[in-house]
Image (cartoon, rainbow, N blue to C red):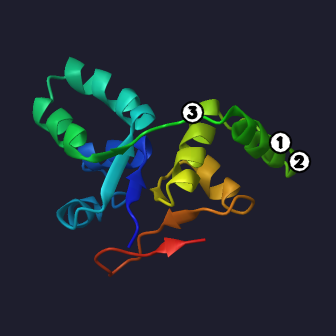
Amino acid sequence: MSNILVDTSIWIHYFNNSDNKAKNIKTLLDDNLVCTNDIILTELIPFLKHEKQNDIIELLLSLRCYKIEIDWNKIQFYQYLNIKNGINAVGIPDLIILQNTLDNDLIIYSNDKHFQVMNSIHDFRRYKEKSGQQAGGADK
């Protein structure tokens, strides 16, 4: 299975132990499938530092981190396709995460609605938890 890029929205649910939106993270971590990038780390680490959550920071920094090499032409094209298909208000960070996912053949694990709707236009894989299964599969 490809590496799974866990988005900020999933980490927040995991850290808060809230509902079942991040129930497979422990299994994915144990199976060494979870990865990250600098945008996700930058969204999480400042708050975690403020809360003195050094163990969690250490965990995040130990994950495989995929380098972000922004291709602004790709980002503009992704946004163009979004707008053309009626998907508005997708932020640049999400488009950069999309590019990082596609460039590295990753599976995105996110509760962010932008990724759900963009999945109908862009050719990327989303991780979907399946009830009753340990580590669900990816969905195109």
Per the image, label 2 sits on a secondary structure element best described as helix
Give the labeled residue for mark 3.
Answer: 93
Q: Nearer the viewer, residue 26 or 67?
A: 67
Q: Residue at x 43, y 39 (%)?
A: 67
Q: Quadrant of the N terminus?
A: bottom left
Give the labeled residue for mark 2.
Answer: 84
Q: Residue at x 38, y 61 (%)?
A: 3
Give the labeled residue for mark 1.
Answer: 80
**Pointer 2 and pointer 1: residues touching (CB < 8 Å)?**
yes
Write down the quadrant of residue 97 in the picture. Answer: top right
Determine the residue located farthest toward the top in the rendered image.
50
Mark 3 residue crowding within 10 angstroms, few (<14) / some (14–19) / many (20+):
few
Q: Residue at x 49, y 54 (%)?
A: 104
Any part of residue 87 in sight:
no
Q: Quadrant of the C terminus?
A: bottom right
Per the image, label 3 sits on a secondary structure element best described as helix
Q: Residue at x 49, y 37 (%)?
A: 68
The amino acid type of the residue labelled 3 equals: Pro
Per the image, label 1 sits on a secondary structure element best described as helix
